[in-house]
Amino acid sequence: MASYHMLPYGGPDGELGASLRYLSQRFSMPYPELKGLLTDIGTEELGHLEMVGAIVYQLTRNLSVDEIKKSGFDTYFVDHTTGVYPTAASGFPFSAASIACKGDVIADLNEDLAAEQKARVTYDNILRLVDDPDVRDVIKFLRQREIVHYQRFGEGLRLATDRLNEKNFYAFNPSFDKKK
């Protein structure tokens, strides 16, 4: 069961990537409300990282050698024992290459919306595989937070689009359309 939880810890759609994505995107976000939104959600994602890490540790700390072998956790165990290491469920280590930070308000917010949906699907998949009620309760909570984040990023995208439309940004962008 612990290997399922590695994806939301350090996988491409996990909490570590989400926190780094949002806390990095905030620097180039042109609107203070959206900088605050990215800071708030990025910080919350760090809390989610701690929760998932605690689940992984609690599920692995007392495994016997037989349980480790039988569960397929042996390859992870050889590299990390029961240390919580950011990796996908497949064993691929975390890479910042899996996150996007374009510096464009519309591109970044759409990336954030997609990231929250991918995280929700990950939690949906975990819920399909796990029957431990204590683990399920935490995963259900995290899944609900992904839905809330998606809604908040949707509100942020609407705010940014309205502000850019007020400036007729898409029809004429002076910074790109100047004649030489």
Image (cartoon, helix red, strand yellow):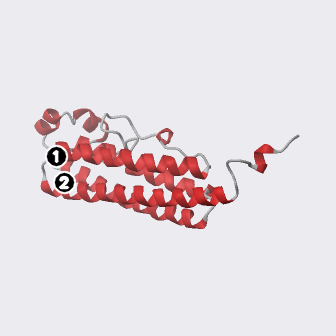
Quadrant occupied by the C terminus: top right
Numbered circle sitting on residue 162: none
Residue 100 position in % (x across, y down): 52, 44
Near-viewer residue (30 or 96): 30
* Amino acid tagged 1: Val
Numbered circle sitting on residue 136: 2
Horizontal arrangement in the rendering, residue 57 relative to residue 109 (left or right):
left
Residue 134 in the image: above or below residue 114: below
Q: Which residue is drawn at 22% across and 36% down?
A: 73
Residue under label 1: 130
Dot 1 and dot 2 residues touching (CB under 8 Å) = yes
Near-viewer residue (13 or 124): 124
Secondary structure of the residue carrying tag 1 is loop
Residue 56 position in % (x across, y down): 25, 50
Secondary structure of the residue carrying tag 2 is helix
Q: Residue furthest right?
A: 180
Label 1 neighbour load within 10 Å: few <14, some 14-19, many 20+: some
Q: Earlier in the sequence, mark 1 or mark 2?
A: 1
Horizontal arrangement in the rendering, residue 111 relative to residue 8 (left or right):
right
Quadrant occupied by the N terminus: top left
